[in-house]
Amino acid sequence: MPGPDSGGDPNGRANLTQEFGLRLVEMAHRWRRVLDERMRPSGLSQSSWRTLFHAARMGGGILQKDLAFAIGIEGPSLVRLLDNLERDGLIERRAAATDRRGKTVHLTAEGQARQRELARIADEVRTQLLEGISAGELVTCMDVFE
């Protein structure tokens, strides 16, 4: 792989950007794979624990359509997922105050407790995966992602 100075080689930058993209995608896959492995004993699917994370992060009373957008899935897929989470007592849906047709999603007390446990596991994974990476390097990565 070419170094940071491609010596004016126009293909050097193209090779670097291609390699960067491939590594970024692979890193995201590995990150999710490790998280999923560690979350598996919770009994929740990846879709379920991701939904709990997003609902907690976005605050109580998030509109279903906004939650679907944040997770990156279509509304009908989210409805089935929310049906299961509601059946398990982890979320409840309420009529939206600002939209007669909309529903808001709220974590129940059980859902909040489960999400806190999942967040603890995610923190452990993050600590493990980012071990040896300085705060400055993380800032640089986040700047690049922006």
Image (cartoon, rainbow, N blue to C red):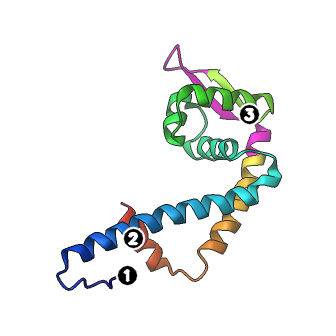
Q: Position of residue 81 (x, y in %)?
A: 67, 32
Q: Check disc 2 and report the residue beneath it.
A: 19
Q: Position of residue 9 (x, y in %)?
A: 19, 79
Res. 101 visible in picture: yes
Q: Position of residue 24 (x, y in %)?
A: 46, 65
- Magenta stretch, residue numbers: 95-113
The quadrant of the image that shows the N terminus is bottom left
- At label 1, counting other C-alpha atoms closer than 10 Å, the crowd grade (few under 14, some 14-19, many 20 or more) is few
Query: At label 2, which amino acid type do we have?
Result: Glu
Q: Which mark is residue 85?
A: 3
Instruction: For marks 1 and 3, give the CA distance.
Output: 46 Å
Query: Residue 10 vs residue 22: left or right?
Result: left
**Circle 3 SS class:** helix
Q: Check disc 1 and report the residue beneath it.
A: 1
Mark positioned earlier in the residue sequence (2 or 1): 1
Foreground disc of the pair 1, 3: 1
- Residue 61, by quadrant, is top right
**Circle 2 SS class:** helix
| Residue at (67, 64) in percent of width and height | 123
